[in-house]
Amino acid sequence: MRRRRVRCFLLAGIGVLYAVSVPWYRASGAPPVVVLGLPDWVLVAFVCYVGVAVMNAAAWLLTDVRDSEEEDAR
Amino acid sequence: MSPGTLGVLGLGLYLAVLACLAVAARRARRDLSPADHFLAGRQLGVLVLFLTLYATAFSGNSLVGYPAEAYRRGYAWIMATAFMLAISVVSHVLVPRLRPLAVTHAFVTPGDWIRHRFRGEYGCQATTVVVGAVMTVALANFLLAQLVAMGHVAGQVSGGLLPYWAGVVGLAAVVLGYETLGGMRAVAWTDVLQGLLMFVGLGAMLSWVLGEAGGLAAVTRAVATVRPSAVMVPDRQACLNWASTIVLVGIGAAVYPQAIQRVYAARSGRTLSRALALLTLMPVVTIAIVTLVGVAAIPRFAHLGVIEADAVLPRLLAAWAVSGPFGAVSATLVFVGALAAIMSTADSVLLSLGSVVAGDVLGRSGSDPRTTRMGKQIAAAILLGMTAMALAPRFTLWRLTELKMELLVQCAPVFLLGLHVSRLRALPVLVGVIVGTAIASAGVLTGVARIQGIHVGVLGLVANVAIAVLGSGRRP
């Protein structure tokens, strides 16, 4: 039960990261500030995707994929 | 030794290893059944499954088409990392429900699920055939993209010794040879080699790109000077396209027939979840690198045409190869890695094409050895047709990918909704797939690829889902 709750939390977090990664909130055409060699909006997106990858990997490790219909029903 | 000769030697060595793996896979064959040929006897372990999923998902498009698209769009192509990640995220909706059913009922093709889900309902057989046909067209398109990429890379790896047509025809014949010889086992084993080569090649490429340009900040400054729009915050339409592409590829690629068949082919559910956990980390490494490579090419090749830009990666590598002995060896390694990625995708597509046409479209039995033979013959025929089309490419590699996804995504409700919505009926699902496909096809035929940045295929998917759900009504 706890595993399932953590998994749901991780999947919800992934949704939030995806929404934040797209620069909707920035004025289009604005010249970017370069941070760590990348335009800031690219860096934000990249950090979000690293977060998605880590959270999704954790979610898969918490996922029980069964090998029979009976086992799945239980 | 010239870079071209070195490239031909590297290619020859790689093809020799592929041949050995194919012969070993042939010897490991247990019987002539479709399950053994198309699913490797359902015995793929974690590492092989992970590398075969990796090599299949990260195709010629990823290594050749994506740097080209990053060259065209600039840093906004970071969206590619997002949509490649989305495939594994969307798989949460598919895999945990489909796997137990697939094992219990011995599914071989995607259509086996449709027959099981809508058994006895009016429209069940038609849904299986229509979904199979849409998948066939999408996969044939995918195969075409791989063949075009093979031609581009083979020409460059040999320093022009192999012309474009020879790369397309010769490598298509190699893929057909080992796929026919060893089935899924040969495909998965060669994918292991191809996945490793691709990974090593990408690491070498990243270090070269950054070293050559003087670091990441220098790349960004140079790009901002040559093409300022490539580093600026994208406009609203580009943001909508970003989100639309995540939906299109995330959902479309999750129901790739070859990915579904790997869900069937895994040794166990635990194996599958571990392989998917590993796979989800790969886009951050792989796609971010190819995006940087494409962006770094902007100042170097300032004015390439739309189709011409598909050769950005081969051009970069050709430049690296003439920079000295280390560059020549490393560039050859990346070239062979890129070819490996393309061939590994082409072989998986070819294997799935044969099984989907024979099993789903033509309705042949999933346990009859004659289905295996028919699948091989169909795969060969489709490969021949696509090879002829690849000799005169008309679309960019990325546009071919979009076209494939716009069709494939119309098959998703049958799987993603069918597994979770018990009241779903076959007939509305069938009408939904037909309407969604018609909308996506209309977009292709009229040349309207996107509306306000949103793919026409995504709009078709919305109509498709609405018809399937509303048409199914309440469960009696």
Image: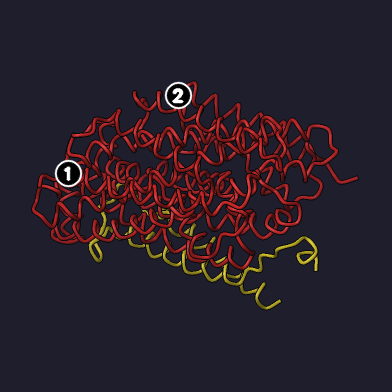
Residue at (70, 53) in percent of width and height: B102
Query: Which chain letter matches label 2?
Result: B
Q: Which residue is mark 1?
A: B318
Pick the front one: A67 or A5: A67
Q: Position of residue B378 (x, y in %)?
A: 56, 30
Vertical arrangement, residue B144 with respect to residue B76, above or below: above
Vertical arrangement, residue A25 with respect to residue B371, above or below: below
In the rendered image, what is the letter of the chain coloured yellow?
Answer: A
Residue at (34, 33) in percent of width and height: B170
Q: Position of residue A67 (x, y in %)?
A: 70, 63
Pick the front one: B433 or B361: B361
Callout 2, which amino acid? Gly
Q: Which residue is mark 2?
A: B447
Residue at (24, 66) in percent of width and height: A36
The answer to whether mark 2 and mark 1 are in CB contact below 8 A is no
Quadrant of the image occupied by residue B299: top left
Callout 1, which amino acid? Ala
Q: Earlier in the sequence, mark 2 or mark 1?
A: 1
One can see residue A28 in this view: no
| Left or right for B181, reference B428 | left
- Chain B colour is red
Q: Residue furthest front?
A: B27
Q: Position of residue B355 (x, y in %)?
A: 61, 38
Q: Position of residue B190 (x, y in %)?
A: 43, 52
| Left or right for B315, reference B186 | left
Q: How far is the residue under mark 2 from the one under mark 1?
A: 34 Å
Query: Which chain letter matches label 1?
Result: B
Q: Residues within 10 Å of mark 1 (few under 14, many from 20)?
A: many
Q: How many marks?
A: 2
At mark 2, the secondary structure is loop
